[in-house]
Amino acid sequence: MICKVISTGTMLGAAAALTAQPVAAGQVEISRGIYVENLAADGSLALEPASMLRQGDSVVLIISWRVRNAERGFTVASAVPGALAFQRSSTEATEISTDGGRNWRRLDHAGRPPREEFRAPSPDTITHLRWRIAPNRASGQITYRALVR
């Protein structure tokens, strides 16, 4: 059996395309981390900071933000690293792109016309995630789960 091992430095580098708009440059501080789910001795799931990832690992990516002037809302966008297959987000209002960030739609398909058939995208096709942060939220955290391909 071949086991693919990936450095989390490579993973975080791929996710470095995090952007925050339209707040003025320098107004938003963003940090991120990647954690792997492991089975604890008592049978519960434990999150541990990841240093290396293996194919099949279930990971949680945490994006934390702090804004100096929270009067205006802003958008946080992140590329999904190619070695990961997106599974779910901590918020239903997540927007997804399957074409490198050119077009977006809500993951929960809210706002689609009635009677329009909804086809959920395959986790393998989601390339970018985006979250709209409401005004007056000075700090917060968003998480999403993924599987290592």
Image (spheres, rainbow, N blue to C red):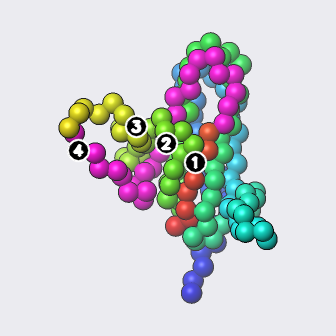
| On screen, residue 21 above or below 125 | above
Callout 1–callout 4 Cβ contact below 8 Å = no
Residue 121, magenta (yes or no): yes
Under tag 2, what secondary structure?
A: strand
Residue 50 is left or right of residue 72, and the answer is right
Cβ atoms at labels 2 and 1 below 8 Å apart: yes
User: Neighbour class for label 2 at 10 Å: few (<14), some, many (≥20)?
Assistant: many
Q: Is residue 25 visible?
A: yes
The percent coordinates of residue 69 (x first, y second) are 68, 15
Q: Report the amino acid beneath label 2.
A: Leu
State the separation of the CA atoms marked 4 and 2.
22 Å
| Quadrant in the picture for residue 116 | top left
Residue position marked by numbered label 1 in the rendering: 144
Mark 4 element type? loop
Q: Which residue is mark 2?
A: 129
Give the mark nearest the N terminus, 4 or 3. 3
Is 68 rendered above or below residue 46? Answer: above
Measure the alpha-carbon separation of dots 4 and 3.
14 Å
Instruction: Give the alpha-carbon distance from disc 3 to disc 1, as whole Å.
Output: 15 Å
Q: Amino acid at mark 1?
A: Tyr
Disc number for residue 117: 4
